[in-house]
Image (spheres, coloured by chain):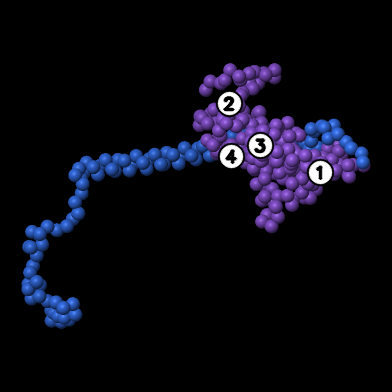
C-alpha cells in the first residue's frame, strides 16, 4: 500500500507515518498488523501514560492498554476521518480506563468515590527515588472527580487543545474550561496543604 | 497564603514504565489480533461453505422439479379403485361391527 508524501523519515531513521496512512492501513484487512504496530510505535507511550494517570497501577494500565488496542482492531470500521486518529485512540483509552474504574467501584459506589484508594496507590506505585512534589501532584490528581481528572491530564500532560479534549470527552468547551479551572484550584490547594 | 507555579512542577511522572514494556505489549496485541483474524476467516469460510451448499441444493431442486413440486394427493381414479364400504363391512368381525355401529350412532352416521 502506498503511503502519503507527508510520511517522512525522521532523524532517528525510522519512518514517521501520517495518521491518515495509519487509518487507511487499519481499515485494510491485509495491513491491520502493520497499522497496529505503527499505532503502538507512535501512540503507545502517550496512551500508556494517559491510562496510567487515570488508573494509577501499572498492572491496570497494562490491561487497559491491551484492551484499548484490541478495541481499536475490533471497531476500526467505526473510525471516521472527521476526527484525528489520536482523538479516537484517546477516546477508546479513556473509556477503557473509566470501565476499569467502574468495575473496581462496583454497584454501590461511583468512579469518583475511588479517590482515596487511588491516592493510596500513588505512593505504592511511585519509584523509590521519585520527587515528593511529583507524588503530591499525582495524589491531588487521584482525588479529583473523573471528569476533572480527564480534562486536567489531557490539557496539562498531553497538551491537548480544548477542541481535542471535546472530541475525546464529549463535553462543551466551556464546561471543559470550567472543569480544568476547578481541577487546577483543587490541586494547588492539596499541594499547599501537604507540602512540607 | 503562599502560592506556587503549577507549570514549574513539570510533566515528569513519579512512576516508571518497565523496560521493553511497549515492545512486549505490541507483540501480545498483534498475536491476539492474529488469533481473532484467524477465527473470523474460519467463520467466514464456514458461512461461505453453507451458502454454496444451499445454492447447489437450490439449483439441484430446480433441475429435479423444473415446474415446482406437486403434493402427493391421490387422484380421483385411484380413490375410486378402493374397496367399497360394503366390502369392508363384510370383512369386519362382530366386535369391529359393534364399535362401528356405536360410532355411526354417535356421529349420526
Marks 4/2: CA–CA distance:
19 Å
Q: Which chain is purple?
A: A
Look at mark 4 in the image and give the residue it sits on: A71
Tally of numbered discs: 4
Q: Which circle's residue, 3 or 4, is located before the other in the chain?
A: 4
Q: Is residue A94 left or right of residue B91?
A: right
Residue A20's tag is: 2
Label 1, on which residue?
A: A186
- Which chain contains the residue that carries disc 4? A
For the residue carrying disc 1, how many other residues have a C-alpha within 10 Å: few (<14), some (14-19), or many (20+)? some
Q: Which chain is blue?
A: B
Q: Secondary structure at mark 2?
A: helix
Secondary structure under tag 4 reads helix
> Mark on residue A166?
3
* Res B21 → quadrant: top right
Real-space CA distance between mark 2 and mark 3, rounded to the nearest whole angstrom: 21 Å
Amino acid at each position: 500500500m502506498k503511503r502519503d508524501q507527508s510520511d517522512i523519515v525522521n532523524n532517528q531513521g525510522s519512518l514517521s507515518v501520517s495518521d491518515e496512512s495509519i487509518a487507511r492501513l487499519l481499515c485494510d484487512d491485509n495491513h491491520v498488523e502493520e497499522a497496529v504496530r505503527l499505532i503502538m510505535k507512535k501512540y503507545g507511550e502517550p496512551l500508556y501514560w494517559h491510562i496510567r494517570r487515570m488508573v494509577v497501577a501499572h498492572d491496570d494500565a497494562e490491561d487497559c492498554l491491551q484492551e484499548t488496542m484490541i478495541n481499536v482492531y475490533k471497531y476500526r470500521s467505526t473510525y471516521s476521518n472527521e476526527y484525528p486518529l489520536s482523538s479516537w485512540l484517546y477516546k477508546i483509552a479513556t473509556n477503557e480506563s473509566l470501565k476499569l474504574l467502574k468495575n473496581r467501584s462496583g454497584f454501590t459506589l461511583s468512579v469518583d468515590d475511588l479517590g482515596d484508594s487511588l491516592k493510596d496507590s500513588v505512593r505504592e506505585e511511585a519509584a523509590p527515588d521519585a520527587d515528593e512534589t511529583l507524588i503530591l501532584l499525582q495524589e491531588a490528581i487521584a482525588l479529583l472527580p473523573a471528569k476533572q481528572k480527564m480534562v486536567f491530564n489531557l490539557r496539562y500532560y498531553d497538551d491537548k487543545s480544548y477542541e481535542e479534549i471535546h472530541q475525546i470527552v464529549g463535553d462543551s468547551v466551556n464546561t471543559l474550561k470550567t472543569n480544568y479551572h476547578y481541577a487546577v484550584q483543587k490541586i494547588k490547594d492539596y499541594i499547599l496543604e501537604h507540602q512540607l | 497564603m503562599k502560592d506556587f507555579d503549577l507549570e514549574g512542577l513539570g510533566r515528569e511522572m513519579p512512576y516508571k514504565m518497565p523496560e521493553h514494556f511497549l515492545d512486549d505489549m505490541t507483540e501480545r496485541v498483534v498475536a491476539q489480533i492474529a488469533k481473532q483474524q484467524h477465527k473470523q476467516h474460519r467463520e467466514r469460510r464456514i458461512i461461505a461453505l453453507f451458502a454454496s451448499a444451499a445454492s447447489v441444493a437450490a439449483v439441484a431442486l430446480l433441475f429435479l422439479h423444473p415446474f415446482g413440486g406437486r403434493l402427493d394427493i391421490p387422484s380421483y381414479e385411484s380413490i375410486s379403485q378402493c374397496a367399497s364400504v360394503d366390502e369392508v363391512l363384510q370383512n369386519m368381525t362382530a366386535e369391529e361391527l359393534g364399535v362401528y355401529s356405536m360410532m355411526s350412532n354417535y356421529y349420526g352416521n
